[in-house]
Amino acid sequence: MKIRIVFYSTYGHVYKMAQAVAEGVREVDGAEALLRRVPETLPQAVLEKMGAIEAQKAFAQIPVCTVEELPSADAVIFGTPTRFGNMCGQMRQFLDATGQLWSQGSLVGKVGSVFTSSATQHGGQESTILSFHTTLLHQGMVIVGLPYAFQGQMRMDEITGGSPYGASTIAGGAGERMPSENELAGARFQGRHVAAIAAKLKS
């Protein structure tokens, strides 16, 4: 059973979450976690000005995803940073290239799930995931979130990401905060949960 984790990360926050999602996937017998990144659309010069080049070296070895490989997955878990309460442009461009998959019904019945990051606690994490779900529904995917069975999203003793819609992390205005252990635990739970549901649908 193949679970693809398709992400975009600027400074490594979403990549850290993607790694945790993959760890959760691998806890399910027979589940294979395949990490993929969507194509970059920003010029190298712009990335340099943003100070993102060094951070992106950490995941440069991850293969770039193609839309053609999505149908071979039993589930796809997408990871994107928040851009004004929505997915980032790189992820949007990637999804906009899946028109042929839509016309052929190639993703109908496959599990789809989303995790995210934002700069601030109320920076659009929930709206990003919910608006992302619209595309997955148009593709006929079965949406899976992060249930309250993951009790870490109920915590009141620390600032933390995570909602019933999916795992998330708060990066800070300058990207200074990496995912907390609680946020990573939510990502692991989501990966495990998605893989378990995909296994049930496949059997």
Image (spheres, rainbow, N blue to C red):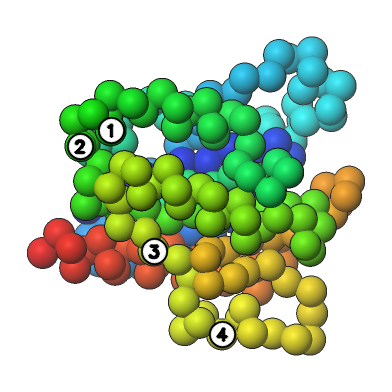
| Tags 1 and 4 touching, CB below 8 Å | no
Q: Residue extending furthest left?
A: 203
Identify residue for label 2.
105
Amino acid on which the number 2 mark rests in the picture: Gly
- Where in the figure is residue 93, as x and y percent of width and height? 52, 26
Mark with earlier residue (2, 3): 2
**Circle 1: element type:** helix
| Tags 1 and 2 touching, CB below 8 Å | yes
Q: Which mark is residue 102?
A: 1
**Distance Cα–Cα, label 4 vs label 2:** 36 Å
Identify residue for label 3.
144
Q: Which mark is residue 151?
A: 4
**Distance Cα–Cα, label 2 vs label 3:** 19 Å
**Distance Cα–Cα, label 1 vs label 2:** 5 Å
Foreground pick, 91 / 1: 91
Q: Is residue 137 left or right of residue 6?
A: left
Tell me the residue at 59%/29% (across/down): 90
Q: Is residue 83 left or right of residue 184?
A: right
Mark with earlier residue (4, 3): 3
How many residues crowd mark 1 within 10 Å: few (<14), some (14–19), many (20+)? some
Foreground pick, 34 / 49: 49
How many residues crowd mark 3 within 10 Å: few (<14), some (14–19), many (20+)? many
- Where in the figure is residue 143, as x and y percent of width and height? 37, 59
Tell me the residue at 43%/62% (across/down): 191
Amino acid on which the number 3 mark rests in the picture: Val
**Circle 3: element type:** loop
State the image quarter where residue 81 is shown. top right
